[in-house]
Image: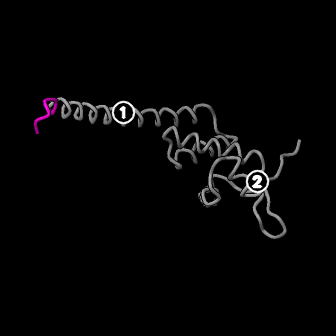
Amino acid sequence: MEDTMHTIGKVATLAGVSTDTLRYYEKEHLIEPASRTAAGYRLYNDEAVRRIRFIKTAQHCGFSLSDIQELLTLKRTDSACCEDVRSVAIEKRLRIARKLRVLQAMSAALNDLIQSCEGGAA
């Protein structure tokens, strides 16, 4: 079954991003148009829409574009194995754990500040 081809504007609407974002993703090699019209307009297939949605979801979960590029490259590479993907995921989890510890320390410091000002005196 052949994918439906979409213009950049339609893909932006379907994926919930701007056309500038799509052009940036293309520049960063996160996506690429499936083809171009005779006039040079980009045409994207349904796989590109899924890929863009994955990118946005991964960003929302705290992955950097560099992390996402690595995951997408692993997915695209025939030689990639589960161990490669697992390794990337473990590294990301460790970074998240470090950030979480910093945020917890900041939260504790803010709690101390709040408690020190409980009486309303400054």
Image quadrant for the C terminus? top left
Q: Residue furthest left?
A: 121
The answer to if 118 sits in the magenta stretch is yes
- Mark 2 vs 1, N-terminal side: 2
Q: In the image, is residue 55 part of the stretch drawn in magenta?
A: no
Asked which secondary structure carries label 1, the reply is helix
Q: Nearer the viewer, residue 67 or 14?
A: 14
Q: Could you tell me what secondary structure mostly forms the magenta stretch?
A: loop
Across and down, in percent, residue 111 comes to: 23, 30
Residue at the extreme right: 1
Cα separation between marks 2 and 1: 38 Å
* Residue shown at the point (31%, 31%) measured from the top left: 104
Q: Position of residue 105 (x, y in %)?
A: 27, 33
Residue kind at label 2, given as amino acid type: Tyr
Front-most of residues 83 and 59: 59
Q: Which residues are magenta?
A: 117-122
The circle on residue 44 is 2
Dot 1, crowdedness within 10 Å: few (<14), some or many (≥20)?
few
Camera-nearest residue between 73 and 117: 117
State the residue at coordinates (52%, 40%): 60
Q: Secondary structure at mark 2?
A: strand
Question: Which residue appears at 63% of the width and 41% of the height?
Answer: 54
On residue 11, the disc is none
Quadrant including the N terminus: top right
Quarter assignment of residue 25: bottom right
Q: Count all numbered tags in the image, as a single digit.
A: 2
Question: Which percent across, then down, holds residue 32?
Answer: 70, 56
- In the rendered structure, find residue 100 and report the number of the disc placed on it: 1
Type of the residue with mark 1: Leu
Q: At 67% from the left edge and 40% from the top edge, which residue is drawn? A: 79
What x and y, as percent, mark residue 94? Answer: 42, 33
Against 6, residue 37 (above or below) is below
